[in-house]
Amino acid sequence: MTAFFEADMQFHIQLVSHIANRELNNLFGTYIYRMRNLALHSLHVPGRMEKTYQEHLEIFENMKQGNMIQTYESIVYHMESPRNISIDED
């Protein structure tokens, strides 16, 4: 789980770095602590690691294809998934 979590965080860091948007980078830096807590919580849900991997793969594939709308939509979906898990369990 720890190795997967670290790889998950590196995916997000690399994604934000690749976009090279100063505002997004600052926002990401502000929320990385919260993201870590949310990710750690959600990754304990059975099947979430596999789902996270599939979501990352979809984001990456959309980026490779240059499909910005699909990339945006897959990023939003990925960001909402763990939050919905946390809300559902509380």
Image (spheres, helix red, strand yellow):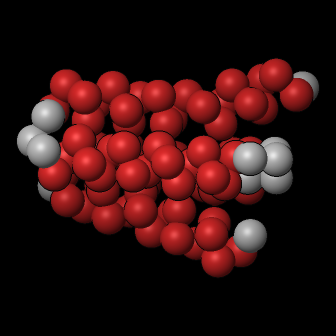
Look at the image and tell me in which quarter the N terminus lies. bottom right
Would residue 67 appear left or right of 38 to someone viewing this image? Answer: left
Q: Residue at x 20, y 59 (%)?
A: 18
Q: Residue at x 15, y 32 (%)?
A: 68
Look at the image and tell me in which quarter the C terminus lies. top right
Question: As displayed, is residue 71 above or below residue 5?
Answer: above
Residue 86, position as x, y percentages in the image:
77, 32
Residue 66, position as x, y percentages in the image:
9, 42
Question: Looking at the image, which is closer to me, 19 or 81?
Answer: 81
User: Would you say residue 39 is visible in this rendering?
Assistant: no
Question: As displayed, is residue 26 above or below residue 74?
Answer: below
Q: Residue at x 45, y 68 (%)?
A: 10
Residue 37, position as x, y percentages in the image:
71, 52
Residue 29, position as x, y percentages in the image:
42, 55
Would residue 61 appear left or right of 76 to someone viewing this image? Answer: left
User: Would you say residue 69 is visible in this rendering?
Assistant: yes
Would residue 25 appear left or right of 41 to someone viewing this image? Answer: left
Q: Residue furthest right?
A: 90
